[in-house]
Each structure stands twice: as C-alpha cells, then as structure tokens.
Image (cartoon, rainbow, N blue to C red):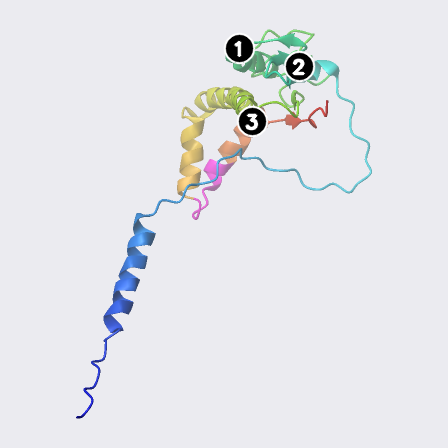
Amino acid sequence: MAKRAAPEVNAGSMADIAFLLLIFFLVTTTIEKDKGLLRSLPPIDDSEVEPPIIKEKNIFTVLINRNNQLLVEDEEMKLTNLKEAAIDFLDNGGGTNAAGESCTYCKGDRSESSSDHPDKAIISMKHDRETSYEKYIEVQNELVAAYNYLREREAQRLFNRSYQSMLEEKEKNQFSKDEKLNDQIERIKDLYPMKLSEAEPDKS
C-alpha cells in the first residue's frame, strides 16, 4: 500500500500575521518618558584662574535636612513661601551706580542686605542624603518657578508676549532657526540668569 504524502503547510501567511502583530504592538504601545530635571552643565574649565570673591549677601542658601524640613537662610520656612522669598532675593536690586551694580529693571526693595543684581544673585541649594526625592523635586520646582516668574514679567514688558509661548514656538520650529526669537529669549535669560548651585549632600 502506497504511503500517503503529508500535506505541506503554507508558512507564508504566518509571516504576514507575525508582521501585522508587530505593527499592532508598535502602534498601540505607549513608552513612558524618563522624568527628571532639565539642566545644562557648564563646560569644563581647565584654566587655573582663581574664582571671584562672592559677597555673602549675594548667596541665598536653601537647605533640606534629613527630616525634610526646609531651612532658608538658616530659618525654617514653609514650601509655599519659598517661591516668593526667592523672587524677593533675585529681584532685590540692591547694587549702587557707584559700584556699577545698579539694576534698572528690578522691582525689589533694593535692600543693602540682599542681592546687588540678578546677575550676581546665586541660589545655593543643599540637601541631606536622607532627604526624600519627592521633597527635593518640590523645592527645585519652586526655585525654578521663581526664575520663570521673573522671566515671564520681563517678556511681557519687553515683547508684550509670554516667555513660555516663546519657548514653545522655539521648540516647535527647532529645525527652522528664528534668529529674532532666539535673541529675544537669550536677552530675557540674561536679565535673570539661572544661577542655581547644588552643593554635595551631607554625609551625616
């Protein structure tokens, strides 16, 4: 009796199905973006130039201890008050014309005990190794919000438009450079440069 030949299985359609499943997976899958803080690191400076002397009044110290308590200028402060305190420091404008540190656009109290000029104002942030990440991010957000508030104010004053909308337009048209827009953004950044220094956390 002759053996019956086994029928061949057409595997061509299987490859099509696998390809369709792969496309379906790529289309429907959502990939989560990494969350973090956007920071531009300064370039490496190999020169041996001595760092300039910084007046103590031009440094705004922010500390988060191991108990997640916020200390600003060695005094305990609520997180809700941090943004306003940072704005008052950055916008103080206590410099004098004689010293060449006068700020013509600052609207602060011009106190002699606070920062001379936004270009010289430095916010020094320090935290403990046991500080929670959530608290660290909350403090960072409040400090960045202070800079953004002042930049928004100057964008409205100089160009009668929102600073955030300028950044969004720049990102939207990143492949077609708008020199005028870029110059306006840089001008605002120069008025209130973000000088946020993060010190090494305490080991204790």
Q: Amino acid at mark 1?
A: Asn
Q: Amino acid at mark 2?
A: Ser
**What residue is drawn where x is 23% and y is 70%?**
13
**What residue is drawn where x is 46% and y is 45%?**
177
Residue underneath mark 3: 133
Estimate the spatial distance between the alpha carbons at disc 2 and disc 3, rounded to whole Å: 29 Å
Front residue of 131 and 122: 131
Q: Is residue 134 left or right of residue 54?
A: left
Of the two numbered discs 1 and 3 on the same chain, state the one appearing first in sequence: 1
Give the crowd class for mark 2: few <14, some 14-19, many >=20 residues within 10 Å.
many
Whether residue 159 appears in this view of the structure is yes
Q: Nearer the viewer, mark 2 or mark 3?
A: 3
Q: Residue furthest bottom?
A: 1
Residue underneath mark 2: 115
Residue underneath mark 1: 81
Magenta residues (range): 174-182
Estimate the spatial distance between the alpha carbons at disc 1 and disc 3, rounded to whole Å: 20 Å
- Quadrant of residue 23 in the image? bottom left
**What residue is drawn where x is 57% and y is 10%?**
108
Mark 2 lies on a secondary structure that is: loop
